[in-house]
Amino acid sequence: MKLLLNLVFYELGFTQSHFDVRKDNIKVIAFHKRFGAKIYKESGEDLFFTLDLKEYETTKLRYKRFID
């Protein structure tokens, strides 16, 4: 996850990441929420998330010991 987000934010220069997760994938949803992602939309099967660069940088510091 960190490697992908570093690519998105630092190499490609995006300020937000948008992605979707199946509603029945409870553990992945919980992970993304802990990492600061916010749900902005949902469909019958999916939750749609956004994560901005500032939130990523804040969360990255909080979990530094786990992701370095």
Image (cartoon, rainbow, N blue to C red):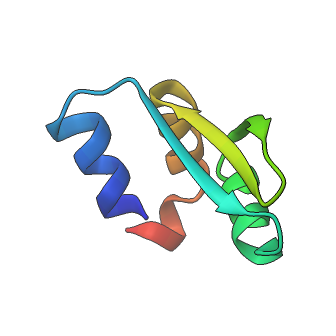
Of the 4 image quadrants, the one containing the N terminus is: bottom left
Which residue is drawn at the image coordinates 66% and 60% (left, top)?
21
Q: Within the image, what quadrant is residue 25 found in?
A: bottom right
Apparent side of residue 18 relative to residue 13 in the rendered image (left or right) = right
Q: Is residue 38 above or below residue 2?
A: above
* Extreme residue in the front direction: 44
Task: Give above or below for 28 relative to 51.
Answer: below
Q: Residue at x 32, y 58 (%)?
A: 4
- In this rendering, is residue 46 above or below 10? below
Residue at the image point whose x is 52% and y is 72% from the top: 66
Between residue 45 and residue 6, name the one nearer to us: 45
Task: Provide residue 38's location: percent of width, then percent of height.
Answer: 73, 37
Q: What is the total number of numbered labels drawn onto the structure image?
A: 0
Relative to 22, is 15 on the left or the right?
left
Q: Nearer the viewer, residue 30 or 66?
A: 30
Farthest residue to the left: give it: 11
**Left-right relation of 19 to 1:** right
> Residue 26 appears at what percent x and percent y?
82, 73
Observer-nearest of 7 and 47: 47
Residue 35 location in percent, x, y?
A: 65, 52
Q: Quadrant of residue 29?
A: bottom right
Give me the residue at 49% from left, 59% from top: 64
Q: Position of residue 39 (x, y in %)?
A: 76, 38
